[in-house]
Amino acid sequence: MPVLPRTPYPIVSSSRLAANIQRMQALAQHAGVQLRPHSKTHKSPVIARMQLEAGAVGICCAKLAEAEVFAEAGISDIRLPYPINPSNADRVLALLDKVTLSIIVDDPAVAEEWAGAMTRAGKVLNVLVKVDVGFHRCGVNPAAADVVETIARIAAMPGLSFRGLLSHAGHAYTAESPYALAAIVAQETEIMTGLARRLREAGVPVDEISVGSTPTASFAPAQHGITEMRPGNYVFLDRTQVALGSATYANCALFVEATVVSRPAPDRAILDCGSKTLTSDGARGFNAFPGFGAVFTSPDAAGPDASIVIERVSEEHGVCRIPESSTLRPGDRVRVLPNHACTAVNLMDRLWLSDDHGALAPLPVAARGRIW
């Protein structure tokens, strides 16, 4: 008998992981767009190579430190859909010697600083302008009277190669229904293609229109004019994606193996996974579920036991409300589907890949904690 890791530990189904990668690649090909997955979900060069071998054109990273890990591992095409400050010009210049790199800008003054840094170094940096399509986080306002003039000014700056437009409809995660989700996608498409058309009419070439999130990915075939999609969560999926209709439990690849460590009351059980394992994220979506993860009492279960609710998490404790008739006892094992796979993975030093026979192999989370 193989020695199992000590709980709690993250376990990933290799077959589901592979199926999720192939499914999204097929969707992108059907939609006629390039797939550039966001690696912030898995933070693993090994999984990134699986995505590239399946047909992805490159990857996205959230921060420069993540990109540095992937570049060191030989990943050669990296996009940072994040507003990198020009104080990091030395790191960007170092990456330009190793990979094809692109970043986003949404401020002409910041773009000028990048243009100056690249010109002084004799380099050219690929940039896309981030567009706010309703999430109201980063991005230029597409309704601003001077938006075309602003982007044209950025596109003309020396040292920069303007590639196009990029958006993230993150508000899709708060959609209240499938119809609301479809409306968000339609609005994103209209904003992005409309702005691209206005730029082209003003003589500014727009080669790329990049969008991306896992909940909106299935709509890609209807997003005419889009050239690239950037989902990330799809490799593992999670309870939020189930709540949004983007996945079924049978698609979810990442779980946390946990042990019941206490049953201090007939209606309460304690798991050895708390906020330092599952995070404190709640499940979002139009079918939002209560608690901090879905509990499966058997690896072969088709779905979670809805009578078990992880009502509270402290650092190392998952406090579950259970029926008094439950047979759970200290020492029993369960599997928990996290509400949010991306944040849970960032808490782990390694994942454990499980084949169809249950054999486990460690996979380091190489870019874990690379937040700078």
Image: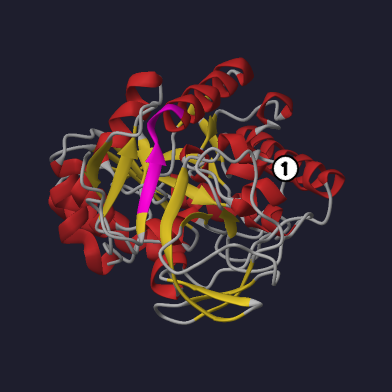
Task: Please state which of residues 142 and 354 is positioned toward the viewer in this rendering.
Answer: 354
Q: Return the residue at label 1.
A: 245
Q: Position of residue 117 (x, y in %)?
A: 22, 58
Query: Is 154 positioned to the left or the right of 281 in the image?
Result: left
The answer to whether residue 205 shows anywhere in this view is: no
Query: Is 245 positioned to the left or the right of 114 in the image?
Result: right
Task: Please state which of residues 272 and 283 is positioned toward the viewer in this rendering.
Answer: 272
Residue beneath the point at 41% across and 80% down? 315
- Asked if 319 appears above or below 109 in the picture, the reply is below
Magenta-drawn segment? 10-15
Tally of numbered discs = 1
- Asked if 17 appears above or below 323 in the picture, the reply is above
Residue beneath the point at 71% across and 51% down? 243
Query: Is 186 positioned to the left or the right of 355 in the image?
Result: right
Task: Please state which of residues 17 and 353 is positioned toward the viewer in this rendering.
Answer: 353
For label 1, the crowd category at 10 Å Cα-Cα, with few meaning under 14, some 14 to 19 and many 20 or more, is some
The residue tagged with tag 1: helix, strand or loop? loop
Query: Is 1 positioned to the left or the right of 40 in the image?
Result: left
Give the overall secondary structure of the magenta segment. Answer: strand
- Quadrant housing the N terminus: top left
Residue beneath the point at 60% across and 35% down? 250
- Is 312 magenta? The answer is no
Q: Position of residue 123 (x, y in %)?
A: 19, 44
Quarter of the image for residue 202 reads: top right
Q: Position of residue 371 (x, y in %)?
A: 30, 65
